[in-house]
Image: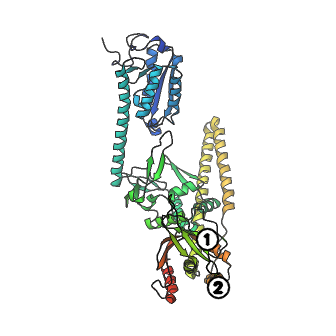
Amino acid sequence: MSNPDLMSPFGTGDRYGRDCPPQVRPKHREKLAIVYIRQSSLGQVRENFGSTADQRELAELPRQWGWPDSNIRVIDGDLGESGTSTVHRDGFQELLDFVRQDQVGLLLAREFSRIGRNAVENVQFVETARRAKLLIWSGRMYDMGSDNDAEIFALQLEALLAELENATRVRRFRAARVAKARQGHAVSRPPIGYIKSVHGQWIKDPEPAVQQAISRLFELAPKFGSLGAMVRYLRVNKLDFPRRRRGALTWESPSRVRLHSVLKNPGYTGYYVYGQVRIIPGLDGKPRRIEPRPESDWIKFPGHHDPYVTYEHWKEINATLAARRTSVRPIVGKGDALLQGLLRCGQCRRWLRTQYSARNGQARGASYICRPIDLSGRPLHSISCPARLIDPSVVRAVLAALTPIEIDAALSVIEDAVQEQKRIHRDHARQLQTIADEVAEAETLYRLAARSNRRTTNHFAGKLEEALERQEKLQRELANAMPAPTRTVTPDDAAELRELTANIQQLWNATGNEDRKRLLRAVVSEIVVHTTTKEAVELEIVWIGGFRQRLRALRPGGGRPADRRGSEERQGCRGDR
């Protein structure tokens, strides 16, 4: 006689015939028979729909074994959910509630790995099922109410093997992706502005408007220096941003997230970059974390595709954006020290505090100090530099940076603005042409329907009306967003502007101490104090725009004559800038 566990699950016997496993008893039929279905990703659900159908067919088994249809349930709430954890699987939690309430007589899954691939959670589920004394079918029947410890161990072993199989498959899959990436074969989706080509290559999007939108971002970034300013500029000028979903191109209002994803992506430099982040699995029900990897760990393949921006320019843009991030600087005090709230320790990244002291009735002198204390009360390190030494050095560097505007540079800026307005007009013309094409297509369909099929005329009439309303709305918005014509700036105008900014030193001398502090904070993000020695203080100015400038403030008698020190520092500032 054949072993019923080894026979085809869909036998031809009667309702209680030989195809019914011997473990099934009337008490089991009085409870629910639950079919649990799971697939690991939405991609598998879309593409491997045969697997879903195969799992659903398991509901036929309890019918053959005597369960009424009212007691057969299919739980498919975990389609597209990974089996590595049960925390966020609503379907599994529903199943677990039924088991704990002793409402389940039979649980069916195509393989036990469908229930989960986490060995610890699977063992816990087996213990819960054992207390409920239900039957589990996963290719063969397991009776959780029996005293056969070997059978229970076999099910737990199946769970362990499922986790091992999954871990091995994931490891091989990741190793294969890394190997392909090292050879310049793209294993990730291309960002907006690129589409897939053959053999893991990318090419620029064939739509010229998409290329122009991406190029515009890298042109605007150095001018505005912040995502918020760029978003406001694009929205005011009604410049939408492209998006592709399964090949279909749409245009949406720009957002900080979308712009950030483009400007932070090194793929626009022509490099294929893989492994920028690492995924840290969550423990104790906590969600997983995504952490950035250091650039030294990235897999970079140069020349993979045509770039939108050079790698050097991309690095400068990201340095600028990083410098403009919101940071809480210490409150500016009322003392004479100009750099309060700007100095940061190069060793521990703490802000230096300002301390005033006086001796023998002299005027108070300010010093900038960083002296963190450990748990035993001993200083971890100590940095101290007088304000009378580094304040003048930083001020000279700032005033040197605020040089008069050159005529050629001013005219170049105006010319760039003119070209940008021309690009905006071209983009608006593209939007108007696109909506005009939609109106023309809707009008054609309406006329064809009116001639051939009156029953669909109203439908296409509504489509035409909607297209006309969108066209009128866009025309109104673009009319209000049209930038004013650019005024012609002559060389004489630029020369006058240069003259107005020529007396920076005189303006500084005529400014009060509080205004000087505000000016410094307006152009300087922070100043890093790297080292202090008996000879000099090594500084690094981080400008608001993201540029960094090294500066050396010599102490009295620090190796150079005092009358040459200021001149050499000023020359060094201009050279660094």
Image vertical order of residue 395 relative to residue 380, above or below: below
Residue 521, labelled with which disc?
1
Task: Report x, y in % for residue 536.
Answer: 48, 78
User: Callout 2, which amino acid?
Assistant: Gln
Image quarter of residue 70: top right
Q: Is residue 396 left or right of residue 159?
A: right
Q: Residues within 10 Å of mark 2 (few under 14, many from 20)?
A: few
Circle 1 SS class: helix
Q: Is residue 264 left or right of residue 364?
A: left
Give the mark nearest the N terminus, 1 or 2. Answer: 2
Viewer-proximal residue among 508 and 275: 508
One can see residue 89 in this view: yes
Q: Which residue, given by chain and number where applicable, does mark 2 sit on?
A: 506
Task: Report x, y in % for residue 353.
Answer: 58, 68
Task: Report x, y in % for residue 316.
Answer: 49, 67
User: Callout 1, which amino acid?
Assistant: Arg
The Cα atoms of the two marked residues, 1 and 2, are separated by: 19 Å
The reply to whether callout 1 and callout 2 are in contact (CB within 8 Å) is no
Viewer-proximal residue among 161 and 429: 161
